Image (tube, helix red, strand yellow):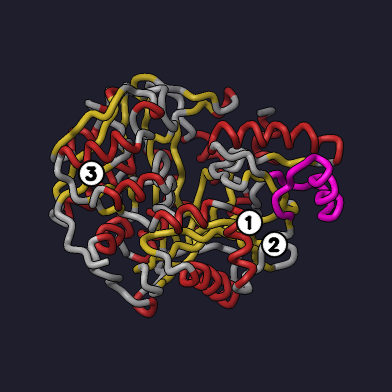
Amino acid sequence: MIRKRISRILVANRGEIALRILRACRELDVESILAVSEADRESLPGRMADRVVCIGPPPSMRSYLQVDTIVAAALGTKAEAIHPGYGFLAEQPALPEACEKYGLVFIGPRAEQIRQMGDKLWARRTAQEIGVPIIPGSGQVQSPEAAAGAADGLGYPVLIKAAAGGGGRGMKVAQDARELGPLLLEAAAEARTAFGDDRLYLEKVISHARHVEVQIMGDGEGHVVHLFERDCSLQRRHQKMVEESPCPVLTSAQRKALCDAAVAIARHISYESAGTVEFIWDQDGETFYFLEMNTRIQVEHPVTEMVTGIDLVREQIRLAGGEGLSFAQEDIACSGHAIECRITAESPEAGFRPCPGRIREWTPPHGPDIRVDTHCFSGYEVPPFYDSLLAKLIVRGNTRREAIERMQQAIACFRVKGIDTTLPFHERILKTTAFRDSAVHTRWIEENVMREKGL
């Protein structure tokens, strides 16, 4: 498909990622139009965009998740392209299909790539076909009896997963046969509500696993590069809380094997745009397994930008305009160590209860190698309708130890009043011996920190 340089983009998202895309548009001299709900009219992204168009009332089901409304907004403002950011419609093939129908450019992969890789069963088969190891598991389990047989073969505990899942929804861990049946019903109901698809499958639980993902970029014609890996092992209920790059436990040979596998998967489907191939790293067996592929820009993309110096969002826009990759694999280097903490409007002391409300003071840290991606400011009213992410605090150091110390200093200087946030929780995590020694795994927060606090 021959394309021309994009000059006007509709940003179909909100919060910090909307502001991040607006900044990239400004740097590329591209006009930006921001689609906002009624709750976001006075938001910081709303003030920064060249133009704002209201797409509906606050609930996302009536605004940010309406494909027809988003496309109508783009056509009505004569936008040439739509950038979905992450979340909302970013991994819904209906949006790129509508873009193609109406002559708009979707800044992301093709609809069939989103559909294929969004089907976890399809993605597992694809990885297996090209020789990339997958987590031992089952195909679709269509009855409790079939699930019980598969679980017996894998050995408990097993992870029940939604075939169309993501974000931790439709995922349950069954410790034994007694738990399996009820959890299957819960997972299916959750998946049906969240994705309109209640297909389930099982995976073996890998104890003491790390979650390691590889950032890739592809031009849609088989040219794919990786931008090294991120370790996202610190999670709470499958939600990432801290990310870092590079992964502190991989050897050079292990890193190369992991990144080569990610490139092979993306190249196999002629992937276009930014994407992330996720793996489970078995620390006991020192081997990796393919987990899934996210066909969008990730929340944690700044970690990669900090160690490579490459602006991933700008590259997305360039690729969507038909300009091709601006770098080859040999041009990409990983320099230093970066860490990101996701700061959310939640109260860790109250079981991570959401804490919307007015921010009386918002004073983020500043300094060399400190980056804060946020849409917040003093006086901002955090709405109750959306994800609780307030900011991403990212630091870089020449070494991991230096990055940890810089993050601790940055958190100590970050002042927020009026609402509860996860800043104290992150401060506590960074002080632990296990984190400093890289002795964590995907369930470490739940089994240690939260258990100690009785959460």
Residue 143: say if magenta: yes
**Residue 206 visible to an observer of this rendering:** no
Q: Give the mark, 1 or 2, whose residue is nearer the N terminus.
A: 1
Residue at numbered disc 2: 283
Q: Residue furthest front?
A: 101
Measured in 3D between alpha carbons, the distance from the residue under mark 3 to the one under mark 1, in whole angstroms, is 37 Å
Q: Residue at x 21, y 48 (%)?
A: 9
Quarter of the image where one finds residue 448: top right
Residue 124: say if magenta: no
* Residues marked 1 and 2 touching at CB (< 8 Å): yes
Q: Is residue 20 left or right of residue 338?
A: left
Q: Residue at x 42, y 35 (%)?
A: 389
Residue at numbered disc 3: 10
Three-letter code for the amino acid on which mark 2 is drawn: Gln
Judging depth in this view, the residue of 427 and 352 nearest the camera is: 352
Q: Position of residue 295 (x, y in %)?
A: 44, 55
Three-letter code for the amino acid on which mark 1 is drawn: Arg
Judging depth in this view, the residue of 388 and 409 nearest the camera is: 388
Q: Residues within 10 Å of mark 2 (few under 14, many from 20)?
A: some
Element marked by disc 1: strand
Q: Residue at x 64, y 31 (%)?
A: 189
Q: Residue at x 14, y 54 (%)?
A: 7
Image position of 222 with respect to 437: above or below: below
Residue at numbered disc 1: 210
Q: Which residues are magenta?
A: 138-160
